[in-house]
Image: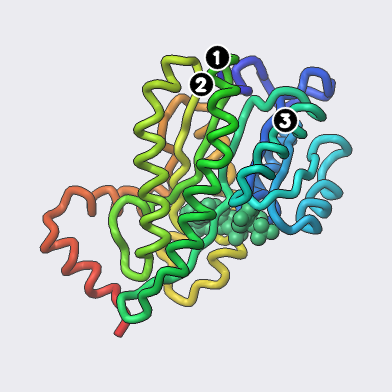
C-alpha cells in the first residue's frame, strides 16, 4: 500500500493522520523540492543530507511540524541505521522512503582514475543500499511501505564522460528490477525514478549542453504524479527518455557513431 492510497486530497491537517516520508539528499535540488511538495499532500517529511544548515532552512520554510531534519551521510552505515530508528521513534513508522542522495563527477578515458568511481559508487549506489538494508526488512515485516530509488536515464547506456555516474545509476536500475517481484509479493511498493536533466545545484555546474533541461517544479510534479501511480519506472522528460530508450535498441555501431560525436576533443 502506498501512503497516498487513503489520502483523497491534500487537505489533511491532523498530525495524527499524517503519513511519514523519509527523503535522502533533501538539502538541495530535487530532494528539497520534493520534501516541500510532499508536505502539501499531508505528509510529515524526515529530511536527510550532510549539510545541516540546508535542512534547518528547509524546516523553517515549511509549515510548523511538517519537516524534521535528520542529518546524515548516507555512506555511513551505522549512522543510517540510527537515523531510521530515530525517525521512527520520533515520527512513527516510515511509509515512504525516497532514496535520492547522489552526486556526479565526470570521468573520461584520458583522465581515468579510481577516485571518482569510489566516490560515486559509495554515495550513489552504496548510499542507497545502506538505506535499503534497513528499510526493506522493516517494510517486508509490516507487509507495507513504499520505496522510491532515484537513478537516472544516464544508467540506460554508457554516455561519454559518465563512466562512473552511469555505472552507479545502471547498478541502481538493475538492482531495483531484481528486487521488485519479491517486494511486490510482500506488499512493498518499489519504484524507480529516472530523471533526465533537471535544473538543480548539481546541473548548474555542468558546462556541456543539457538537452530538454527541465525546471525543478516540473520535475517534482512528474515525480509526485508517478509516485501516486502504479508504474514501476517514473521517467522524464519524455522526449529525452524515449531517445535514450531507443539507444538501447539500436546496433552498437550506430550507437557509438552517435556518442563519438558527443565526445569532446
Ligand atoms: N539534476 C538532474 O539533472 C538529475 C538527473 C538525473 C538524476 N538525478 C539524481 O537525482 C538526485 C538528486 O540530484 P540533484 O540534482 O537534486 O542534486 P543536488 O542539487 O546536488 O542535491 C543533492 C543532495 O544530495 C545530498 N547528498 C550528496 N551526497 C550525500 C551523502 N553522502 N549523504 C547524504 N546526502 C548527500 C546533498 O547534500 P549534502 O552535500 O549536504 O550532503 C544535496 O542535498 C541524485 O541522485 C542525482 O543523481 C539528478
Question: Disc 1 on helix, strand or loop?
Answer: loop
In the image, 196 versus 128, the foreground residue is: 128
Label 1 CB-ligand 1 distance < 8 A? no
User: Residue 28's spot in the image, x, y percent?
Assistant: 67, 56
* Quadrant showing the N terminus: top right
First in sequence, mark 1 or 3: give its number: 3
Mark sitting on residue 14: none
CA distance separating discs 3 and 2: 19 Å
Q: Are marks 1 and 2 in contact (CB under 8 Å)?
A: yes
Name of the residue lying farthest toward the bottom = 265
Q: Which residue is mark 2?
A: 188
Q: Which residue is mark 1?
A: 143
In the image, 162 versus 109, the foreground residue is: 109
Question: Disc 3 on helix, strand or loop?
Answer: strand
Q: Is residue 72 left or right of residue 260?
A: right
From this view, report whether residue 18 is shown above or below residue 151.
Answer: above
Q: Circle 3: is it few (<14), some (14-19), or many (20+) Cα within 10 Å?
A: many
CA distance separating discs 1 and 3: 20 Å
User: Residue 99's spot in the image, x, y percent?
Assistant: 57, 42
In the image, 137 versus 96, the foreground residue is: 137
From this view, report whether residue 186 is shown above or below residue 58.
Answer: above
Is residue 49 among the parts visible in the rendering? Answer: yes
Amino acid at each position: 500500500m502506498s501512503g497516498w492510497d487513503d489520502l483523497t486530497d491534500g487537505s489533511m491537517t491532523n498530525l495524527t493522520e499524517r503519513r511519514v516520508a523519509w527523503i535522502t539528499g533533501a538539502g538541495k535540488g530535487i530532494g528539497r523540492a520534493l520534501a516541500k511538495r510532499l508536505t502539501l499532500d499531508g505528509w510529515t517529511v524526515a529530511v536527510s543530507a550532510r549539510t545541516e544548515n540546508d535542512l534547518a532552512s528547509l524546516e523553517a520554510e515549511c509549515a510548523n511540524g511538517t519537516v524534521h531534519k535528520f542529518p546524515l551521510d548516507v555512506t555511513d552505515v551505522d549512522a543510517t541505521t540510527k537515523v531510521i530508528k530515530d525517525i521512527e521513534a520520533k515520527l512513527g513508522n516510515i511509509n515512504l522512503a525516497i532514496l535520492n542522495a547522489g552526486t556526479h563527477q565526470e570521468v573520461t578515458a584520458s583522465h581515468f582514475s579510481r577516485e571518482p568511481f569510489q566516490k560515486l559508487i559509495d554515495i550513489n549506489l552504496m548510499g542507497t543500499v545502506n538505506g535499503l538494508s534497513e528499510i526493506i526488512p522493516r517494510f517486508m515485516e509490516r507487509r507495507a511501505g513504499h520505496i522510491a530509488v532515484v537513478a537516472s536515464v544516464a544508467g540506460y547506456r554508457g554516455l561519454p564522460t559518465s563512466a562512473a555516474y552511469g555505472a552507479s545509476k545502471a547498478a541502481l536500475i538493475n538492482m531495483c528490477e531484481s528486487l521488485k517481484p519479491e517486494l511486490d509479493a510482500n506488499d512493498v511498493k518499489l519504484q524507480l525514478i529516472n530523471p533526465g536533466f533537471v535544473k538543480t545545484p548539481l546541473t548548474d555546474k555542468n558546462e556541456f549542453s543539457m538537452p530538454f533541461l527541465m525546471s525543478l517544479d516540473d520535475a517534482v510534479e512528474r515525480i509526485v504524479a508517478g509516485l501516486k501511480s502504479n508504474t514501476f519506472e517514473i521517467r522524464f522528460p519524455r522526449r529525452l527518455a524515449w531517445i535514450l530508450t531507443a539507444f538501447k535498441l539500436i546496433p552498437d555501431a550506430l550507437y557509438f557513431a552517435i556518442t563519438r560525436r558527443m565526445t569532446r576533443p
